[in-house]
Every structure is written in C-alpha cells, then in structure tokens.
Image (cartoon, rainbow, N blue to C red):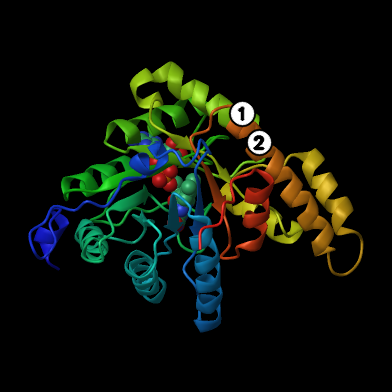
Amino acid sequence: MTFDSVRGRDSAGWVSRTPSIVDRLRTDEGGRVPFSVEFSPPRDAAAEARLWRAVREFERLQPAFVSMTYGAGGSTRDRTVRVTGQLAEETTLLPVAHLTAVSHSVDELRSMVGAYADRGIRNILVLRGDPPGDPMGEWCKHPDGVEYADELVRLVRDLGDFHVGVASFPEGHHRSPDLAHDTKFLVSKLRAGAEYSITQMFFDVEHYLRLRDRVALLDAEQAAKPIIPELMPITSLRSVRKMVELSGSVLPPALEARLAAAAGDGPEENRAAVREVGIDVATKMGERLIAEGAPALHFITLNFARATSEVLANLGLAVTHV
Ligand SMILES: Cc1cc2nc3c(=O)[nH]c(=O)nc-3n(C[C@H](O)[C@H](O)[C@H](O)COP(=O)(O)OP(=O)(O)OC[C@H]3O[C@@H](n4cnc5c(N)ncnc54)[C@H](O)[C@@H]3O)c2cc1C
C-alpha cells in the first residue's frame, strides 16, 4: 500500500480536494434539500449490470453523494472496493465508502482505507458492523481489531485527509441498554471526529425528531452536525419485514396492516399495490422531514432507481441533468 497517499496526497504530491459530504450538503441547488442514495455491492455479473443501470439513472438526478455498503468477507470485500473505485473514477457521483470493523485487524483496516484513498475516495462511513451470519448474534472483536466505531473514527482520521460519517439510530441501536446510552455513544463518535451521521431507516418521523432533540440536549456543538435521515421506499412487504428484523427498526402496526391489505391474500403479494403504498409513505415522510429541517434525504435503493426516482419526483427533488 502507498501509505503517503493515505496522508492526503496523490502521486504528484497534491493535497486531495475531494469534497466532503458536509460541503456537498451546503451547496444550495436552487433551494432544494439535497438527496443521496445507498447502493450495495453486487453479488454477480447480472446484479452488477443492474447496479450500473441504477447508477446511470441517478447520475442524471445528481445526488449530493452515493454510498456503498460494506460486507465483510473476501470476494464481497474485493468487489466492494472495485465498484466503489469505479464510482469515483468513472462517474460524476461522489462516493462514500462504508467500512466496518468486522473480522478485521487494525492493520487490515488501515490497508482498506489505503485502498480507498488510492482510488481517490476520501469520504468514509465508519461502522462497527454486525457479526457475520447473524446480525443479532454475539459481537466478537477481532483480537487485533477495534471494539466500537468511535475507535475506528479516530483510526481513519489519524490516517490523513478523510471525511468521516457514522451511523445513528432513531429508535436506538439493538445493543444499547436505552436511548440515553445510545445517544451518548453517538455523541462520542461525533466528538471523535465524525462530521455527520446517517440514520438507520425508520418509518415514524417522530423517532428522527426525538433523536435530534436528544443529541441537542446532550451536546449543542455536536448537534450542529448533520443527522441525515435514511428512507426506504417499500416495494415488497416480505422484504421490508426481513429488513426491519435485521436492522432492529420497527414497522409501525398501522403501516404493516396497510401494506398487508395491499399485498392481499394470494400466494404472491400484490407488488404493484404494495409499491404504491410504499411510495406514498416515503413521499409523506420526506415532506415532513423537509418541513422539519432535515439536512438531506438518504434513500436505500437496493440498486434500483425507479421507486426512489418516483419519490424524488413527488418531492420536487428530481431535476434531471443530461
Ligand atoms: C446508515 C447505516 C449504514 C450501515 N451500513 C452498514 C454496512 O455497510 N455494512 C454493515 O455490515 N453494517 C452496516 N450498518 C449496520 C451497523 O454496522 C450495525 O448496526 C452495527 O451493529 C452498529 O454499528 P455502529 O457503527 O453504530 O457501532 P457502534 O457505534 O460501535 O455501536 C455498537 C453498539 O455499542 C454501543 N456502544 C458504542 N460505543 C460504546 C462504548 N464505548 N461502550 C459501550 N457501548 C458502546 C452502541 O450504543 C451500540 O449499541 C449500517 C447502519 C446504518 C445506520
């Protein structure tokens, strides 16, 4: 690894000028609230082709940034670094690489950051990650790794000119004993040098607003950092049930009942009807979040552009640039 490049210089010795996410959120595009999207590493060639179709669609809509999730494990890891590098090098998008501490020693984590830096990626979303296989299973730190995300924030910051974001949890992280502890640990990640956080998905805007209040009560300085709400336009009842189970978020009973009614009783759920509800819900959440001053809206896309584009159009945020 070329470690000097991690120190913020490219091979010609220039200090990196990659914009930070916070800079991007400040850029006022005609008074519109910025939006961003999350992609996941594709598992095979067909999934990769689908991802690139979504990437090209979103390029026209000019998100403030795009993030790429991270899965531990050899082949996924290599593909994640490769595809995130391609986003930086072959598109007009600003990528944020997710990085987790799962199964990695500190040396491996440093070398991952170096691999990103070598591709010009300076924005990193730092996460602890979940135990492989069972996200709710027992967390075991790598013997030479880090225990909590705040250590990883410091590690990445110490490596040079990186802009770091972290995860926040409007409903509290499933391992936190209560919301007060959860807020305290979020604030310690921000104090460690994170510039913003992106929330876990949620389906009740009150959870986001209460998180913002808790951070403001605990530390006014850190509360000035953007808390970017994450929205997922629901397109399948079956998959949203699975996702909330894995994420620890709650699908409010009234919403679940509405989705179940739309899905119907047939052997296959009525995806068109579920999708209609999902888009309506995400649109209304987006409207409320914008009215409440959210700094941006971050969308889980599952590597599809259509549902998110519809929500963006409903919100007046989809201005196409060819
Ligand atoms: C926006 C977003 C993106 C994500 N992307 C990915 C991804 O790409 N890949 C992936 O595998 N996972 C991803 N996750 C999931 C995330 O890795 C898990 O939720 C993980 O369990 C928590 O990560 P963290 O960074 O918040 O951990 P931490 O901040 O370390 O927190 C973990 C738990 O420990 C508690 N805690 C923190 N510090 C301390 C301390 N000093 N003492 C005691 N307890 C403490 C916290 O309250 C929490 O309960 C993402 C989550 C979000 C919200």
Q: Which of 7 and 55 is in front in this view?
A: 55
Answer left or right for 278 relative to 292: right
Q: What element carries label 2?
A: helix
Report x, y in % for residue 179: 52, 28
User: Are discs 2 and 1 less than 8 Å apart at CB?
Assistant: yes
Report x, y in % for residue 193: 27, 36
Q: In which quarter of the image is residue 110?
A: bottom left
Type of amino acid at the residue the image marks with label 2: Glu
Answer left or right for 45 relative to 113: right
**Cα separation between marks 2 and 1:** 6 Å
Labelled disc at residue 287 = 2
Q: What element carries label 1?
A: helix
Report x, y in % for residue 299: 56, 51
Type of amino acid at the residue the image marks with label 1: Ala
Labelled disc at residue 291 = 1
Q: Residues within 10 Å of mark 1 (few under 14, many from 20)?
A: few
Answer left or right for 72 relative to 313: left
Q: Nearer the viewer, residue 68 or 28?
A: 28
Query: Can you name the residue that lies furthest to the bottom here?
Result: 45
